Amino acid sequence: MRYLSTRGHAARPQFCDILLEGLAPDGGLYLPEFYPQVSDATLTKWRGLSYAELAFELLSLYIDDIPAADLKAICDKTYTEEVFGTKEIVPLRPLGDGLYLEALSNGPTLAFKDMAMQLLGNLFEYELARRGEELNILGATSGDTGSAAEYAMRGKKGVRVFMTSPDGRMSPFQQAQMFSLQDDNIHNIAITGVFDDCQDIVKAVSNDLTFKRQYKIGTVNSINWARLMAQVVYYFAGYFQATKTNAEKVSFTVPSGNFGNVCAGHVARSMGLPIDKLVVATNENDVLDEFFRTGVYRVRGSADTHETSSPSMDISKASNFERFVFDLLGRDGGKTRSLFHDQLASQGSFDLSADPAFAQAVSRYGFASGKSIHADRLATIRDTYQRFGTMIDTHTADGVKVAREQLTPGVPMIVLETALPIKFAATIQEALGQPPSRPARFEGIEALPKRVKVMPADAELIKRYIAENVH
Ligand SMILES: *Cc1c(COP(=O)(O)O)cnc(C)c1O
């Protein structure tokens, strides 16, 4: 398998080259040259597999520069009951009316990002050892991404993590999760500023090419193809649990921010998995819902980006969306480039409403969308708890609310559970008048010693800190 850029660059790298790279050289995102098709016979064969075996079969279609036995070992070591809590790894729970919750949040940091990041950690360690190289991951987080990255990379050879976060602005639980890590290769940097300051620092350091090369600076953000590919696996696993035969279809509703999670659903559907609808659920930051309703993609300014009670979906633009638009436009790299590079930069938006391709987002690709606001979240959390005894987190609640509006009789609707409620305790308390339950292994983590360096929002000081801690 070779990979291409959504903006038409001529290079065709293999998997391991794009694994350690972020963007393509022309600023585009990588996609496989084609989506391998999964036949009826293959689906039948895959039905009986364990999650790790399924991951191996699927990944093998996209990775041909790692020997099969090594890739198998990586999958086996990643997707274990010990790490993800159950033998099924992503079990389904019914919530009435043909609606199911797919549990993706029982990994080390209690959010779905572990599903991909745990694999990424093992792939990085493998590939860096093979090349005799090292990598220093520099990131900015307001919560879930940073902790998932740290738990995936802790103790891994050849990798260090320097994770910036806005000082005092993450939930106490999220701070405790990250700052209690004592591994030598994990560095928490609390910036006295807001999340945008953290992102600016990452940008400034990455734009210093001399420094970047000398200190082997890399990222783990959601545009990495390996993360997206790992997420494709749980769409198949969810489908197999909700159906008995390959003649049945299911729909998925996905709480969405950067469009990474639901883009994996688009890949699964493009491979031939019998998915009816892919429903994009947004919060008040409804960039994506607006696009699927109107054909207009309008990036928001920071004044226009709301701070909500489902904060991991508080985005101003959806960084993975370019992948879907590239497919929607018949994989026209020139056209994608002109939309994302030229029009977004000059006008902050583009409009596909008059393009015949736009209608295909629904008719050919199965997309639908909806929006949920704070009052919806509270009502949905309450309703789900009262009727089913199940506590859901605020992001998952956005999904359940929108999913109930999109039900088709006879078609199971699977909502992806993107985090556990304990991560967003204040809103659960507001909705239910009681705190969320806490998995036993997280009892008392707020009291553990914290390892964090507080620093001002100054890229030069961060560079110096990295240089001092790379040895
Ligand atoms: C990251 C995240 C999302 C959004 O996922 P995208 O891939 O960015 O669409 C939703 N919910 C939670 C809890 C998250 O951590």
Image (spheres, grey):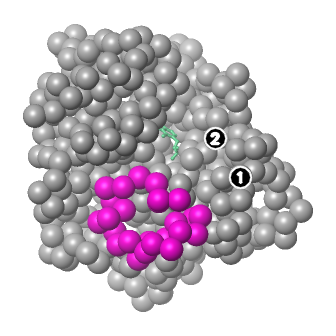
Magenta run includes residue 226: no
The mark found on residue 317 in the picture is: 2
How packed is label 2: few (under 14 Cα within 10 Å), some, or many (20 or more)? many
What's the residue at 10%, 34% (across, down)? Answer: 471
Q: Position of residue 277 (x, y in %)?
A: 66, 63
Let me know if residue 409 appears in the view: no
**What amino acid type should be assigned to the residue bearing mark 1?**
Asp
- Asked if disc 1 and disc 2 are in contact, CB closer than 8 Å, the reply is no
Residue 173 left/right relative to 357 = left
Residue underneath mark 1: 342
What's the residue at 33%, 59% (across, down)? Answer: 19
Residue 288 left/right relative to 36 = right
Q: Position of residue 86 (x, y in %)?
A: 27, 50
**What amino acid type should be assigned to the residue bearing mark 2?**
Lys
Q: Residue furthest front?
A: 210
Residues in magenta?
A: 2-26
Q: Is 419 situated above or below 5?
A: above
Q: Quadrant of the N terminus?
A: bottom left
